[in-house]
Amino acid sequence: MPKPEYLHFFVDPNRCIGCQACVQACTECDTHRGSSMIHLEFVNRAQSVQTVPVVCMHCEQPTCAEVCPADAIKRTGDGVVQSARKPRCIACGNCVLACPFGVPEVYEDRQIMMKCDMCYDRTSVGKKPMCATVCPSQALFFGTREQIDQLRPMSMPVNRFRFGAQTISTRVFMMMPAEKAARQPYVDVTSAMAEQPHERVIPLAVVGGGDPFAEVEV
Amino acid sequence: MATIPVDPLKIIEQFGPHRSGTDGLRRSTSAEPERLVKTHCCFCGQQCGVQLKVRDNEVIGFEPWEEFPFNRGMLCPKGVKRYLQGAHPDRLTTALRRDETSPHGFTPLPYDTAIQEVASAIARIQAQHGPASVAILSGASLTTEKTYLMGKFARVCLRTPYIDYNGRLCMVSAGAANKKAFGIDRTTNPWSDMVGTDVIWVAGSNVAECSPITTNYLWQAREQGAKIVVQDPRITPIARTCDLYLPVKPGRDAALFAGVLQLMIQHEWIDREFIDAFTIGFEAVADYCRQWTPAHTAEVTGVPERSIRQTAEWWGTAKTSFLFHARGIEHHSNGVQNALGTINLVLASGRIGKSKSGYGTITGQANGQGGREHGQKCDQLPGMRDIANPEHRRHIAAIWGVDEPDLPGPGVDAYELFRKIDAGEIKALLSMCFNPKVSLPDSGFVTRALEKLEFYAAIDFFLNETARHADIVLPGSLQEEDEGTVTQVEGRVIKINKAIECPGEARQDWRIVQDLARALGRPHGFTFDGPRAIFEELRRASKGGIADYSGITYEKVEAQMGVFWPCYSEDPQTGRAVDHTGTPRLFERGSYNPIAKGNGPFYFPDGKARFNVAEYRPPVDDISDEYPVFLTTGRVVSQFLSGTQTRRIGPLVDQYPEPRIEIHPRLAAKLDIRDGDWTIAETRRGAITLRAMVVTTIRPDTIFIPYHWAGEKSVNRLTVAAQDPISKIPQYKVCGCRVRKAGGAPAYEAVLEPQQ
């Protein structure tokens, strides 16, 4: 049974608490026991506790597949980009270099590229992906558009990402502040990368703004 | 003398902590489970529902339990990996006897011999020094059935007043404040009530790391318009995106609450009607608060005046609200006052006992709630009864089939118990589910006291750091090897289900206790054939008490997916038998309770809640010229309490392998400390050397060290044994400290423990 078209994966880094339940749960999978296909990134731990969970975004036109010299990366009819196929993958790492989101990894011991396949074993039988099931902050959410609209009125799902001249559409949505998404219905990744790390920290809502510890003497 | 038999590293070689991982059946990707057992996580007070995969008497994995209403499948990393505590190389499968001649300090002995030896040591010491020369320490991670049995065992079989539990380090400040203000000690509302409120104030709770599942409730409330106020010396993951962050100086919480209340009174942002109709004591509180002007409050608390004013306005003018607190304000020598300060804010607002307004303390341990209700506390009898109250004593004595005068009176708190060991008054100790050598403050003193014991027996499934001092170790049971109930953070009684049998000679803890009673020649009252039978007696014992469980059955718990206490077998108003579904929400207007008898919603004879003057007092061992930096302690998300379990689960060890000293770059620069440098933190009790973690997410005058580690890495070597005068909770959250860069790596770094 293919994954129902109406169920979607939404990522909301604003909710992420960095607990790594997703990472730990991902390592339980029968197809990659002991290895996590989801990455948990600290944006800049020295400056913030902000973390971002990184799953495969399942691009409509996957760059990883386009650059694969062995044609080992396939996209299913329902839009899930799968791990490299075993007899074909030559572990060259082209996909690792090319993926704009930094998702695929080559496992040297197994000589194969593996990545998040949205828990195809679970989603294909009507279950939620493991990470989105356990996520205690629901920074990873799996459900319908109607559910997400109702549950997250302050945010809007966006699935277009701009990398310089390239715009990518993905199966997975990223939640953006509704106001911002209304003005700019895509994530401009390149311009975000140009910002200095300090400015990337989401400012704390301290009355008056700024460093909440500015007045503390040492 | 209960000294450590051989070099601790030799003990560790044999008994761990070693790391478990996915191996054997658990590595196999083709091993299908024989069955899924619906149960709950063994760690924190959230008690998330989870299904354990079982095969060949081994827990081989987990599957989310999406139907359980509290967490709906969600789990933190501890819940995901909790299954790896089973089939562990360190698991105790026989009893042990201390043996200096053995290379690893202990030799196995047959279970029955061990029981006999413990019983005869207790009998001998009690014959020589009296019943009160033997003490019991138990814990709030045990099922309610076991906590009930431990309380009964101490009073009826051992006839000692000296029993206390590790909830002394956890829930007692909140418990004492709740009883003083409301007459009952429980969170007021189910968590689902949080969604749809105007303001949520999180006072001293690192929700994201200590009670992760609560995060989704908070975020969902925010999506629907709630403003989140977070009060913490650190910018925790919850604080990062809150609407208002109050960077309180450690140990100044009561002042902050008084300052906010003063502004509310001044601006008439209080509910006079509610205060007049449903409370007493407001005027004295208002008098006390008058001195807490915004400027004075800001000066004492370190919270900017404008933020104090903003908090008062939001809290004062909200229509609906929740206030949560946890150990951040409770772990203080002023812990009860701090908790009362929050309750005053709630009562003054009048927002309690309604569907979208409530108050609660976030419990820490699995059974942080149930474990504080049924008699393992030194001053308590089942049903939240008072051991000094003659009527309560008569009721319980009748249930237990003993004469009331034979029941001992109140004992002492867990730390005082160690002072009595140190003074030679208590000669023998039996402990279960408590690792005081790691978890109590000023642990150097605790170790010295342990060494003075004439006899020490420990019941545990792993040889924890305290049990290394034991003369005899009895192999107990893991949570998944037994059944029983626990009461989670919302006051919901839930059922732990057995997944596997105990390995080897290990026994379910209640069997061990009953075997001891039999070996002591006093089996009367300790012949239960299982947890269900214990629960049936507990129901009768709790009946008529404040924590009334009389209407709860295992079947009802299962059918309703949890039952909120009080749950009556007889309607308290009419006395007629009733099929009561429980009490999800306390203090609703017009509600009837057996104490107020219709006079009001609160659990006092007049039905009114109590305002209590919640006085600010500076912490004991506050910062000084000599020790100018605040030291505060707490948890990380991948570890739990003293780490007996989580330091043995490989993937959790990998997530945060070693404690670090969190320090702000401004303080670090002043001390010439860079990220990763070996750094010495020193207090009046001692010094430890750990690596620094330089981050802007902490007050620049404060350092933070997590407390889950033992030995040279244990921050409780530094913490102060100052206690709250009412609750006796230790002041873990603040003491004066000095920090300097270390000359190099500490000696322990070269000696690898197996989990490294």
Image (cartoon, coloured by chain):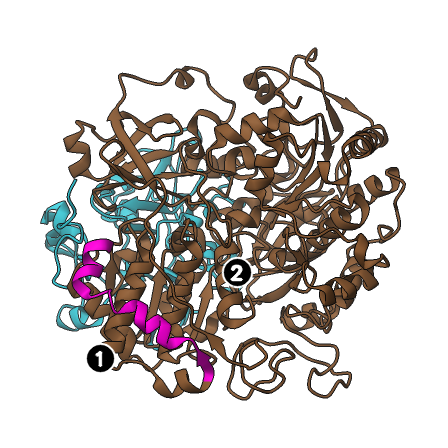
Q: Residues within 10 Å of mark 2 (few under 14, many from 20)?
A: many
Quadrant placement of the N terminus of chain B: top right
* Numbered label attached to residue B175: 2
Q: Chain of mark 2?
A: B
Residue B592, position as x, y percentages in the image = 60, 84
Q: Could you confirm whether marks 1 and 2 are on the same chain?
A: yes
Residue B705, position as x, y percentages in the image = 36, 38
Q: Mark 1 sits on what residue?
A: B267
Task: Look at the image and give the residue range highlighted in magenta.
Answer: B278-302
In the rendered structure, which disc, 1 or 2, sits on the residue that comes first in sequence? 2
Q: Give the left or right position of residue A43, taking residue B152 as reference.
A: left
Label 2 element class: helix
Q: Residues within 10 Å of mark 1 (few under 14, many from 20)?
A: few
Question: Magenta region's main secondary structure?
Answer: helix
Q: Please tell me which residue is depicted at 33% across the width and 43% down the height of the picture.
A: A104
Q: Is residue B267 magenta?
A: no
The amino acid type of the residue labelled 2 equals Gly
The amino acid type of the residue labelled 1 equals His
Residue B640, position as x, y percentages in the image = 50, 43
- Which shade is chain A? cyan
Label 1 element class: loop
- Which shade is chain B? brown
